[in-house]
Image: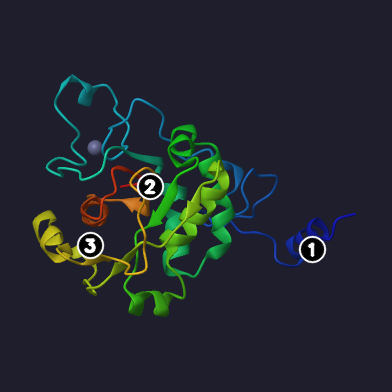
Amino acid sequence: MKLAPIVRGLSDVLFPPVCVHCRGLVEESAYRQLCTRCARLLDFVRPPHCPTCGHPFYGDAEGGLGCPHCAGLAPAYRKGCTAVLCRGPARALVLELKYHGGRHVLGDMEAIFRRSPSVLARARGAVLVPVPLHPRKERERGYNQSALIAAVLARAAGGGARVVTLLRRVVDTPTQTSFDRRTRRDNLKNAFALDSRAGLNPSLHYLLVDDVFTTGSTLNSCARVLRQAGCLKLDVATFGHG
Ligand SMILES: [Zn+2]
Ligand SMILES: [Zn+2]
């Protein structure tokens, strides 16, 4: 008998897993931190979706009107994709990881990636580059959530996918949420730089990874640095959108 299931079973008795979204008990769910009811609310992104930000097209955006979620972005990368829409339970997972030290949700994020074929296809065999946090913020939080998400995505995707830290955040930008798009873009100018130890190979496929696609400004700033450093095959993947 293996020890891990026993330990897990025992800890479930002592500390029954609680759903991060509704705080109910999690029983017989495909997820560890989402109950079956909340798991059904997960909004998986299926094609067709916007090639830049990954938001699903619901018919209306397909007639050449463009995507309202990434309008004006001028991406410095090729394609963007996302696993789920960032609301309800998916949002709860992201917030738990980001603000409550909730590394225990990473298993569920991996399970969600495993059910997201288009994200897996992009990540398979790729060099995954997490969007960096400023060192001060990373020290405060204890980790960079994007790096942890990249790690579970690499594991789910396989094919030699691996996480490499290529970028540094050199400017400690203020929290973005209170600014409009233009201010966000200006704030992010030169906020990122190539890690001096980093070596780039233009024949490899690189995939920038972040927790959430919001306006795309952060990801695009990172993409610009990688492009300038000679990264040709560059795509973007996020856990959630919105
Ligand atoms: Zn629930
Ligand atoms: Zn879009």
Establish if 128 lies above or below 172.
above
- Quadrant for residue 175, please give it: bottom left
- Quadrant for residue 133, please give it: bottom left
For disc 1, the marked residue is 7
Measured Cα–Cα span from mark 3 to mark 2: 25 Å
Q: Position of residue 187 (x, y in %)?
A: 14, 66
Q: Is residue 184 left or right of residue 163?
A: left
Find numbered disc 2 in the image and state the secondary structure of the residue it sits on. Answer: strand
Residue flagged by tag 1: what amino acid is it?
Val
The N terminus, quarter of image: bottom right
Residue 207's disc is 2
Find numbered disc 1 in the image and state the secondary structure of the residue it sits on. Answer: helix
Residue 177's disc is 3
Nearest to N terminus: mark 3 or mark 2: 3
Badges 3 and 1: C-beta atoms under 8 Å apart?
no
The residue lying toward the viewer, choosing from 90 and 3, is 3
* Rendered-image quarter of ligand 2: top left
Find numbered disc 3 in the image and state the secondary structure of the residue it sits on. Answer: helix
* Disc 3 crowd, CA 10 A, few/some/many (<14, 14-19, 20+): few
